[in-house]
Image (cartoon, grey):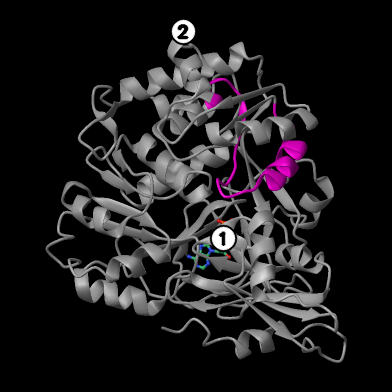
Amino acid sequence: MSNHLHDLMTGPRFDTDKVVLHFGNGTGWTRQQLFDRVARYAAVLQSLGLQAGDRVCLQVEKSVETVALTLGAVQAGVIFNPLNTAYTTAEISYFIGDAEPKLLVCDPSKRDALTIAAEKAGVTHVETLGADGRGTLATLADLAKPMTTAVARSADDIAAILYTSGTTGRSKGAMLSHDNLASNALTLKDYWQFTEQDVLLHALPIYHTHGLFVAINTVLVSGASMIFLPKFDPEQILSLMPGATSLMGVPTFYTRLLQQQGLTKDATEHMRLFISGSAPLLAETHREWQARTGHAILERYGMTETNMNTSNPYQGERIAGTVGFPLPDVSIRVTDPETGAMLEQEAIGMLEVKGPNVFKGYWRMPEKTASEFRSDGYFITGDLGKIDHKGYVHIVGRGKDLIISGGFNVYPKEVETEIDAMTGVVESAVVGVAHPDFGEGVVGVVVLNKDSNLNEAAILAHLSTSLAKFKQPKRVFIVEDLPRNTMGKVQKNLLRDSYKDLFKA
Ligand code: AMP
């Protein structure tokens, strides 16, 4: 048996002396250098006692060493679990308690705090990797003898676990197999016509499916290269466009680039493809982008559990406000959210998806997994949408109250639970309202005890120690009562309406 994903990524068909990872400063790694580093990390994982199916959790800043580590895990047959760098120690404790990794890799600055959490969770090793690519794990890789083979893994073996929050606020680990990742990478390469000539501007984080799998895997399987940037800086992106061909971004990238005076047809002349996803791109942004640059942004739709599901066409009309067609081998249907009955074209309902891209289930949650799949194998996405008469998929809303701020999912329940736990709080409701920069901004609405002297500043200060920055409300309002319907349910739509102009420029 071979190692499905590793074989695909390292396939000998591409020029090994070509620079595949440009660091943005004139230096970079060739394919040869990248895969030598990958093989060293694979050897390090083995030497630390990690065997096929064991987990490595990583909460590290974006660096090329992190890329090599994740690919090294694939080579060693180890399941890797990247964690958002914004998570607090308390949040990481939950993830390592659930994933039970043998190794936790963290930023050197967090080592002391996380070692205590790791010991409690029974993690055998804690090693470090910093934003500069240095740390105890990188030193072990320097000294290691590269692994010359790959640990055998089949198409259905798990390559990665990515956590996605549940609507109840409890995070679930989506188990992604070697073939989930491999098949989606090959599909996207063909659909978006990536070749060895492509140079992708990579400015997304790499603990999320978008920057990690959609971007990196598509580049590696097509023999393309990427300019690997630590973060999104619109001026820098603009200055690098003459040496690049493509950009993958969240809608915020495009709204921020539109604020750059230098964004013109000339500035984007060398680029062939701008892709957007992870949150809805406003039709207005699409139109403005086309007017300024002559390029139609290609919007696609996916999620952690399913990789990419749909895409606007490469050739053919890219329609603003739609997420395009189901990708080859992916089936999408729309059903009645209550009964599960199939709906006609143009009818709005629950989007369900089936295909080689769809994950293998939630880590150690068989009941949750069973409840989110239909008996014929379709996954219930939680997104509401429709398929129009031309076959384009539209997303009209998300599973009720999910907030997407800056491309990241924020589950109101999780924020409400933190607020409600504060002394003096009676109850709270958290909603997302339109925000010009982040898509949506988180807003907390809180009812206090009569004698409480809590205020907005005190609540925000408390949340800054318990929640990742992207989940923290931008504003908190103290009210007498929450609006409720006759069934006693809080009417969040009314709250959203009340605060809808809050962040208007
Ligand atoms: P995540 O698991 O973090 O990738 O989030 C997945 C969710 O993001 C999906 O279930 C959708 O609700 C949303 N999403 C992703 N892409 C789009 C898009 N192009 N338009 C609207 N919503 C999107």
Which stretch did the figure color magenta? Answer: 73-101
Residue 7 as seen in the image, left or right of residue 291: right
Q: Residue furthest left?
A: 266
273 and 425: which is toward the camera: 425
Mark 2, other Cα within 10 Å: few <14 / some 14–19 / many ≥20: some
Q: Is residue 330 above or below residue 443?
A: above
Pointer 1 or 2: first along the chain: 2
Residue 423, image x and y in percent? 83, 68
Quarter of the rendering occupied by the N terminus? top right
Instruction: Tell whether circle 1 marks a residue whose Cβ is less than 8 angstroms from ligand 1.
Output: no
Q: Nearer the viewer, residue 96 or 463?
A: 463
Q: Relative to 143, is 235 on the left or the right?
A: left
Task: Tell me the crowding category of disc 1: few under 14, some 14 to 19, or many 20 or more residues within 10 angstroms, Cα based.
Answer: some
Residue at the spot 63% in from the left edge and 59% down from the top edge: 464
Which residue is at 25% across, 37% downward? 196
Q: Residue at coordinates 20% horizontally, 68% vertically from top-left? A: 293
Task: Name the one closer to the observer, 338 or 468.
Answer: 468
- Tell me residue 42's x, y (percent): 52, 18
Q: Quickly name the residue at label 1.
A: 470
Mark 2 lies within 8 Å of ligand 1 (Cβ measured)? no
User: Which element type, helix, strand or loop, lies under badge 1?
Assistant: helix
- Disc 1 residue type (three-letter): Phe
The amino acid type, in three-letter code, at marker 2 is: Lys
